[in-house]
C-alpha cells in the first residue's frame, strides 16, 4: 500500500515535471527558462564552445558540454565584446558570448509555433541579441523568436586574407547558430520546417550572405534582409590585411609580417585591448562605421565561409533558392549622414560646413570606396563626380542636406537593393520581393545622430525594423499607424515562415515576385498603407 502510494506520487511528479514548460531538454541536458507573464524565455543558451583562448580567431566549435545540473537559461544575453560608439561606456560585453535566446508565446490552444530567427545588426561592429526587443512579437503571440549572438569587430572579423587568419568568424558563428536552431527548436515548441531568418542592416547583409550557401535551404524556409544586403559597399572589406597587422602593432605585437605569428600574438592579448583598438581605425566619431567586417577568404582556407564575391556567387546560381525579401527605407542614408548636422555645443558649427573643405578626405570613409583598388586620383575623381551629381555647384550646408542624405541612401543602401534584385531575378529560381518603407518615425536614428529635433529627415534606417524588434528607450511609444504596420509586418513574417499559402501578404497587398518579371515589382509602405508598384527603372 505504502509502496503503491509512493509509485503514484512519483508518476505524478514525473508528469508535472515533463509538462513543465520552463524545463526544456536538449542533447546537452536540461535547461530552465523563465515565465514572463504572456511568454516564456530561454536565454543565453550556448551553441558554440566559448571562442576564447586557443579558439579565438577560429571557426566556432559546436557546444558539446553535458550539463550535470539544470542549465540556468534565465540570464539575459550579454553582447559580444565590442567598441560601441553609441553608448557612454564604449567598451562593452564579454568574449564568451556565443549564445541563442529564445522567446515563446503562451497560448493554451497550441504548443508549437513558426519561428523567426533574427541576426542582429550593428555594422559588424556592435549590437547583439540584447539590443533587439521582442515585445511586439510576443504581444502578437504567433511566432517563436530566436535571437543570435555572433562575434563582431576585430574578434569577429580580423583577417590577413590567407589561411592562417582567414576571418569571417562572426558569419561562421551565425551559420552554426542557424544549424543549432534547426536541430533544437522543436524541443522549445518551434516548428523546425517553418523558420524564417530576418536581419536588419549588417544583420540583413548577414542574412543575405547566409542565403548564398546552397544548404541554407535546409535551415530556413525564407529570408528577409531589411536595409542591408550583401551587395552594399560596406559589406565586403578589401583592406583587411593591412588592418590586421595594424591591429597587431596597436596591441603591442610589433611590426610583424607573418600571419601565423600575428595570430599567435593576437591570441595572447587581452580581448579588451584588441577591441579597444577599434578607436584607432576611426577618423572621427564613428566614421567609417564598419572598419572590420566580412572578407573574401582563400579557396583553401579551413572552414571557409565566403571565397567569391557575392555577385559572383549569385551569378553561379549556387545559393539557396528560397523566397528572399530585400528592403530599404526612403531615406536610409540618414544613417549616417545625419551626424553631419550635429552642432558643436561650443562653436555652433556643424560637420556639414566643414565637409566643404574635407570632402575628398572624408567621402571614401563615409561611403566605403577607400578599400577598393582605386588610386588616390581615381578616388578623388569619383568623389568629385558624386558631389557634382547630387549637389551640382551648391555648397555642403543645411540647405543641401537632403541631397547629401539622398547620396548616402543610394550609395550605402539602395543601389545594392537594385543590384541584388536584378541578379536574383536573373539567376534565382525562387521568389524575390522588394519593399520600400516611407513612414518617418518621430524620433529615429537621424534625430539621435544629429541631436536635433528641429529638422525633418524622412524615413531613415531602422524606422521600419524597430516596429518589429523594438529598441526600447529610443522609441518608447509608437504611433497608432505604426502599431498597425508593426502587426502587419509580424503577420508577413508568419506568412514567410509558414510558406504554405502561395504569395505572402503585407496587409491587403500581395507581395509581387521579381523573378521572371520584366519590370521591377516594389511594395511601398506609407502611413496610409501599402501599394504595389511596377517600374522599368528601379525607383
Ligand atoms: C567643438 O569645437 C571646439 C573648437 O573647435 C573643439 O575643440 C571641440 O573638440 C569640438 N567639439 C566636438 C564635440 O567636436
Ligand atoms: C544635445 O543638444 C542639447 C542642446 O540642444 C545639449 O544640451 C546636449 O549636450 C547635446 N548632447 C550631446 C550628446 O551633444
Image (cartoon, rainbow, N blue to C red):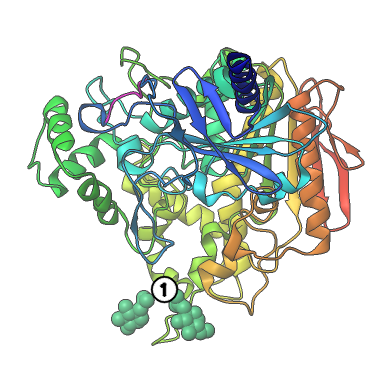
In percent of width and height, residue 360 lies at 39, 59
> Can you name the residue that lies furthest to the right here?
508
Q: As drawn, is 241 to the left or to the right of 390?
A: left
> Can you name the residue that lies furthest to the left here?
254
* Residue 497, placed above or below residue 87: above
Identified at 23% across, 38% down, the residue is 244
Q: Quadrant of the C terminus?
A: top right
- In this view, the residue in front, 365 or 206, is 206
Q: Quadrant of the N terminus?
A: top right
> Can you name the residue that lies furthest to the front here?
1
- Which picture quadrant has residue 518? top right
- Cβ of mark 1 under 8 A from ligand 1: no
Q: Which residues are magenta?
A: 57-61
Q: Give the residue number, with chain letter if any, for mark 1.
A: 354
In percent of width and height, residue 57 lies at 27, 30
* Residue 360, placed above or below residue 435: below
In percent of width and height, residue 89 lies at 35, 63
Q: As drawn, is 339 to the left or to the right of 265?
A: right
Amino acid at each position: 500500500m505504502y509502496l503503491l502510494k509512493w509509485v503514484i506520487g512519483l508518476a505524478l511528479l514525473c508528469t508535472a515535471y515533463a509538462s513543465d514548460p520552463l524545463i526544456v531538454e536538449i542533447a546537452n541536458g536540461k535547461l530552465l527558462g523563465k515565465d514572463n507573464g504572456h511568454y516564456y524565455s530561454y536565454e543565453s543558451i550556448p551553441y558554440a564552445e566559448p571562442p576564447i583562448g586557443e579558439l579565438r580567431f577560429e571557426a566556432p566549435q559546436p557546444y558539446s558540454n553535458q550539463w550535470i545540473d539544470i542549465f540556468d537559461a534565465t540570464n539575459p544575453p550579454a553582447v559580444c565584446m565590442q567598441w560601441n560608439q553609441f553608448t557612454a561606456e564604449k567598451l562593452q560585453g564579454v568574449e564568451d558570448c556565443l549564445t541563442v535566446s529564445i522567446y515563446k508565446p503562451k497560448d493554451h490552444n497550441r504548443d508549437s509555433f513558426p519561428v523567426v530567427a533574427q541576426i542582429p545588426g550593428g555594422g559588424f561592429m556592435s549590437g547583439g541579441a540584447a539590443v533587439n526587443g521582442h515585445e511586439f512579437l510576443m504581444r502578437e503571440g504567433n511566432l517563436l523568436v530566436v535571437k543570435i549572438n555572433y562575434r563582431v569587430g576585430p574578434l569577429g572579423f580580423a583577417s590577413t586574407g590567407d589561411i592562417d587568419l582567414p576571418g569571417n568568424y562572426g558569419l561562421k558563428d551565425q551559420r552554426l547558430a542557424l544549424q543549432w536552431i534547426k536541430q533544437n527548436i522543436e524541443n522549445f515548441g518551434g516548428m523546425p520546417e517553418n523558420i524564417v531568418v530576418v536581419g536588419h542592416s549588417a544583420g540583413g547583409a548577414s542574412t543575405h550572405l547566409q542565403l548564398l550557401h546552397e544548404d541554407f535551404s535546409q535551415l530556413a524556409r525564407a529570408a528577409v534582409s531589411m536595409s542591408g544586403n550583401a551587395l552594399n559597399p560596406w559589406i565586403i572589406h578589401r583592406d583587411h590585411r593591412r588592418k590586421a597587422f595594424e591591429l597587431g602593432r596597436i596591441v603591442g605585437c610589433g611590426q610583424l609580417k607573418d600571419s601565423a605569428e600575428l595570430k599567435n600574438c593576437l591570441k595572447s592579448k587581452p580581448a579588451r585591448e584588441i577591441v579597444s583598438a577599434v578607436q584607432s581605425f576611426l577618423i572621427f566619431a564613428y566614421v567609417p562605421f564598419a572598419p572590420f567586417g566580412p572578407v573574401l577568404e582563400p579557396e583553401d582556407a579551413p572552414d571557409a565561409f565566403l571565397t567569391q564575391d557575392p555577385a559572383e556567387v549569385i551569378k553561379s546560381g549556387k545559393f539557396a533558392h528560397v523566397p528572399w525579401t530585400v528592403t530599404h527605407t526612403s531615406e536610409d542614408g540618414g544613417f549616417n549622414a545625419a551626424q553631419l548636422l550635429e552642432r558643436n555645443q561650443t562653436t555652433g558649427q556643424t560637420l556639414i560646413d566643414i565637409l566643404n573643405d574635407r570632402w575628398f578626405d572624408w567621402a571614401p570613409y563615409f561611403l566605403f570606396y577607400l578599400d577598393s583598388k582605386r588610386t588616390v586620383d581615381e578616388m578623388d575623381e569619383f568623389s568629385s563626380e558624386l558631389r557634382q551629381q547630387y549637389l551640382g555647384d551648391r555648397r555642403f550646408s543645411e540647405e543641401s542636406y537632403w541631397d547629401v542624405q539622398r547620396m548616402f541612401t543610394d550609395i550605402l543602401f539602395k543601389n545594392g537593393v537594385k543590384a541584388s534584385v536584378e541578379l536574383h531575378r536573373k539567376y534565382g529560381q525562387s521568389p524575390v520581393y522588394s519593399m520600400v518603407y516611407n513612414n518617418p518615425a518621430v524620433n529615429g536614428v537621424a534625430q539621435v545622430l544629429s541631436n536635433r529635433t528641429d529638422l525633418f529627415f524622412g524615413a531613415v534606417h531602422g524606422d521600419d525594423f524597430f516596429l518589429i524588434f523594438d529598441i526600447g528607450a529610443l522609441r518608447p511609444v509608437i504611433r497608432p499607424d505604426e502599431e498597425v504596420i508593426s502587426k502587419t509586418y509580424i503577420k508577413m513574417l508568419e506568412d514567410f515562415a509558414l510558406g504554405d499559402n502561395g504569395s505572402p501578404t503585407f496587409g491587403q497587398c500581395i507581395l509581387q515576385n521579381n523573378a521572371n518579371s520584366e519590370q521591377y515589382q516594389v511594395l511601398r509602405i506609407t502611413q496610409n498603407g501599402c501599394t504595389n508598384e511596377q517600374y522599368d527603372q528601379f525607383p
